[in-house]
Image (cartoon, helix red, strand yellow):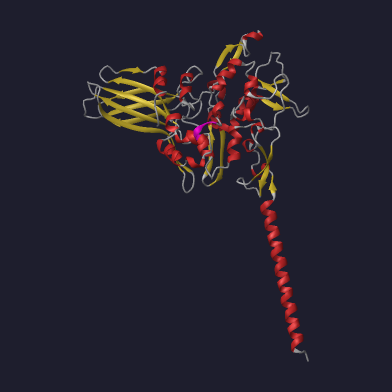
Amino acid sequence: MVSRSETSVGNWKLKRNIYISFFLFLVLGISIYLYRNQREIAIEQVFPGKVWAKPIENLPNLKGVGAPTAKNCGSCHTEIYEEWKRSTHANALSDIQFQSELAKPSSPKWICLNCHIPVQNQRETIITGLKNGDYFRPVEIPNPSFNAEMKAEGVTCATCHVRVDSESKESYVIGALGGTSPPHPVKIDRKQLQERCYDCHNETYTLNESLVCSFQTGTELLSTKSNESCSSCHQPEVRRSIVKPSLHKPIRKSHKHGFIGAGVPKTFDLYPDQIRLGYKPGIVLTEIKVEKNTIEVQIGNINANHHVTTGDPERFYRLLLVGLDRDGHSIFNAETTIGQEWSWSPVAKKVGDTRIPFGEKFVWKLKQSDLPIVSFKFQAIHVRLKNITSDYMIQSSGYVSSPYREKVEKMKDLYPHSSLVIESLYHINSKSRKDTPLEELFKRNQLRKGE
């Protein structure tokens, strides 16, 4: 017979083994979970083939130049440097709207910065990978080549023009034309320079249901089968020496480096430079027709080799038509928009698109009014930022760190939301038009506040 004490011992041993097995299983499970949750996954595995997923590698000092900063490049390329300083690219990091977006808790900051400060020298840390492939959990180490001055330069000269030679491991400049004798190493690759724009300005990617990057300007341009490149419009050709006069280099074909876009600069003090650096509206008011029962306004995409609007999906044109009586008083108002419409919650998706592809027209038809209208004033306003959006940014400025917090709080006064780019007065009886000169519009834009 088995005694009661032996049975108790046997039961105790069985329970002990069960407890030990459970404990070991628990430890193993936790270990596997921690391993899988903490393992570092290469960025290339998470975002295969995506240029924007990593910054340009650290650039060593450039022979004959020093650190590859815009300021150092500007010591010889003085005129180009002055143009660049007035550009959207130079303000890519300091952009008040961008800083507000960057500060959101939902912002994958390191990804956003890959386009706004694209060179590794501009980053205080190097992202070596992502914990468990999660883009909200980057693995960071200090960057020994961090250059604070270069960081402040945003999209700097080196973004497009400097790379590292794979064999010598030395920095060199990518040139477009050749035929010069610069003090620094240079390789001529015009095609690479032209296609560099696409790395940031031609990407559609969904990070999650509420984070969508939708920039298709390059695809829109290529669909026209045009021979034009981005620089054809955004860097107009000019004949000049590409370096300062004291170096006595010949006059040659060059390009302006103001990178003018939609005519809505990053600060009000940049308005006087827009036309000088090459801005002209992508759209053109091609016709206003007033007949018995209808008013018809035709807008053509004549000057842009991509859709208008393009880039940021929240940009749009506001079209206004005001009917005036004999005394110049407004007695009729109508409004419509050209652009995309997106729903951002609960899932980001495009729900409408009235943009104009290159070479096509937008026709706005309205019913004729019985009011005693003698003329119509038409305006086209390019809107970058809605008032309702900037109001929200101001309210949530607590997320933004100094010195940008104070600027976000005052963004109505500091940050241009929109620009009036076309204005025309149409007289019904004479069927004549008088267009306001662009120079006059931009003087007025400098004084406009808000949307």
User: 42 or 387: nearer the eye?
Assistant: 387
User: 431 or 252: nearer the eye?
Assistant: 252
The question of residue 340 being in magenta is answered with no
Q: Can residue 249 be seen in this view?
A: no
The correct choice, above or below, for 370 with respect to 326 in the image is below
Residue in the image at 27% along x and 26% along y: 323
Magenta segment boundaries in residue numbering? 94-98
Looking at the rendered image, the quarter that the N terminus falls into is bottom right
- Majority SS type along the magenta span: helix
Residue in the image at 66% along x and 53% along y: 37
In x, y percent, where is residue 303? 47, 22
In the image: residue 95, left or right of residue 326: right
Looking at the rendered image, the quarter that the C terminus falls into is top left
**Would you identify the image quadrant in which residue 286 lies?**
top left
The correct choice, above or below, for 438 with respect to 201 in the image is above
User: 253 or 116: nearer the eye?
Assistant: 116
Q: Is residue 46 visible?
A: yes
In x, y percent, where is residue 274? 48, 20
